[in-house]
Image (cartoon, rainbow, N blue to C red):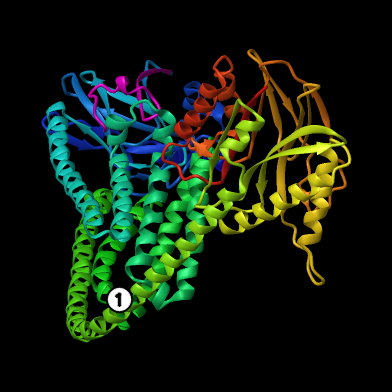
Amino acid sequence: MLKYFTLLIISLLIEFSSQATPTRIVPDKETIEISAKSIRYYISPSTSSKQVSSVSKSIHQFKPIHSTIVNLGFETRDVWFFFELDNKQNPALIRNLHLSNPILDEVDIYQKIGSNTWILINKGGDQRPFDLRQHQQSEQLFQLQIPENSNIQFLMRVNNGGEQFYFNTTLEKDIYTKNEAGKHQLFFGILFGIMGFIILLNFSMGLLFKQRIAYIYTLYAVFFTLLQFSLQGLGTAWLWTDQYFIINRANPVLATLGVYFFLHFTYQFLDIGTYMPKFGKWILRFQYLLILNLILALIPGESFLFISALAVNAMTVLLNIAIIIPLIIILKRGNRSARSYFVAFSVLQFSVFVFVFRNFGILPDSFLANNGLQLGAATEMIILTIAILQRFKLMNDDSVATLAKANKLKEELNIKLEIEVAERTQEVILQRNELAEKNEEIVDSINYAKRIQLAILPSQISIQRMFQKAHVWYAPKDIIAGDFYWFKDQEINGQNYRFFAVADCTGHGVPGAMMSVLCMNALNESCAKLSTASTNELLIKTSDYLSVYLSSDDQQLADGMDISIACYSESTQTLIWSGANNPLWVMNDSEITVYSPTKRPIGKTDSSIAFEEHFIQLEKGTRVFLFSDGLIDQFGGQNGKKLKTKGLRAIVESSLAFDITSQAKHIQDSFLDWKNSEEQIDDVCMLLIEF
């Protein structure tokens, strides 16, 4: 019997100890703290425990809070809180329940009605529509109606998705809430105004001094300011309202980016790569971890958010510790920028440790713990901005000193250079005069070569004797050319034949002109030895001729020519044609017939393809068009592209109805319009004959 009595006493004591002490309402007080002694909590083991009906049956399992505020670190599960309000002997009241953490994801408040009925009376949080908030503020405020002479019990479900799970709980009069909101707006208005000014100042310094470090610090300041903005719930209220994914991920993303750019700034500002190259490599590797953490924060899923939030806090602590020794070493080595950095770093480190330790539940909730990070960050930003200005001033002073030395050296060099210039000027004048004389001699020689080349080419009179309607356009790229046109009146086996061709020799300018003379001579000699009127035979003999004359005992030149050559018999009105890489176009009033050449040159070649010979029966008014590739390879037009065969054909087709003189002029003018101001890239030669 005594055994059972003892167990009963123990169970009653346990039940009594688990009961929350009611918070007594004092009507005259503007704010009443619901202390830890007045709150019990219960962490849901699974999502099924979200039902208030099942949780209300387990109130006896709720645990007391062993700190001055609710602080559960980075808890991901639902947490239920139980508290009582004692309003006995008081009239009915309305109070605002204030949870000091503005970034809680979900909050549901239930009130007990009767013996065992719980009804939902209010809900809110970052993951709920902003319009549900009764005061439309960034703070977590919930209006409670407290009846007169009552003792009311409440259950509150809170979930923060793996982010910092802390808050202090107070009951406030509405006037007090509004006054505190005004104070907060003033405080954060000044704070973010300072931060915004610092951001603009650093960005302006980057533009003014063209220094990359100012841009890096600007990015750090932007992300760190946005982080403070988000931590105060202002992001949800003003920037990304009801954008739940952004709200959920903003803090770890902004924190990671802030740490990344601050680490990058530290590396540049302290010149760690010079003073401590090994440690500098570790910093660069650590940045990759931050990038990985940023990716984790952006992946949907509560577990990724939890890992990212926990990791960025842990990495912040590790970095603050790891940077101390290198900072001291760099200070001892006389880095002038390290002193300011040390002061700023000490302020920021203190505030960061306070912030992180509060997140882990080590430090209690207080004004310094809640706002220390903002105050420390603003102080650090001011100190480092002044340090950056001093750094630029030192750089400017060094530049001025260097410039003064350079000017002095310049003056000394100028005196020396004036003497040397006077001497060299006389030498240059003599050399210029000598070069001018030699250039004049070269130009005179080339002009004389031009006269020789023109003398070798068929004259217009000789061409007109062979073909009354024939037009030649010959436009060398330089003074003399590698392209040429060729006419030959040859008797074979008692019959008269008229040969004509347009050829393109290897190269242009002087080398091309030399080849053209050799190739014309080869055509003349080969034509004289023809046994039949065959353009195929003529090309073979010419190719053999060039192969012999361009070879010696120790070398064989691969130079030669591309050619379109034809043989005309007036008695039979027949045209025999062959081509080596150059085509023949035959035209009447309405169409163009293209005869494709054999794909091999005249001269030394590895190709064994036989030249193809075409026999064309001519009618009165038929025209033939021969041209070198200088026409189709020319760049021009609106886009600076090649004319190509398609473009040339369009020009020719548009002039089929013209008389031959007008057609020749149209082709020439259209080509020049196409070329416009572009440089001519090759010799141009074309021949147009009407039979």
* Nearest the eye: 22 or 107: 107
- Residue 244 at what x, y percent from top left? 42, 29
Check disc 1 and report its element: helix, strand or loop: helix
Which residue is denoted by mark 1 in the rendering?
Answer: 429
Residue that appears at 62% across and 54% down: 512
Q: Decide whether residue 133 is among the magenta residues.
A: yes
Q: Which residues are magenta?
A: 117-138
* Nearest the eye: 573 or 636: 573
Q: Quadrant of the C terminus?
A: top right
Is 18 on the left-hand or right-hand side of 523?
left
Residue that appears at 63% across and 39% down: 628
Q: Decide whether residue 72 is among the magenta residues.
A: no
Q: Residue furthest front?
A: 494
Q: Quadrant of the N terminus?
A: top right
Is 315 on the left-hand or right-hand side of 100?
right
Mark 1 surroundings within 10 Å by alpha-carbon count, few (fewer than 14), some (14 through 19), many (20 or more): few
Residue that appears at 51% across and 45% down: 295
Q: Is residue 545 visible?
A: yes
* Nearest the eye: 681 or 12: 681
Q: Is residue 109 above or below residue 300?
A: above
Looking at the image, how many numbered discs can be counted on the residues? Answer: 1
Q: Is residue 8 visible?
A: no
Disc 1 residue type?
Answer: Ile
Residue that appears at 20% across and 76% down: 403
- Residue 165 at what x, y percent from top left? 40, 42
* Nearest the eye: 438 or 382: 438
- Residue 183 at what x, y percent from top left? 13, 39
- Residue 199 at what x, y percent from top left? 23, 50
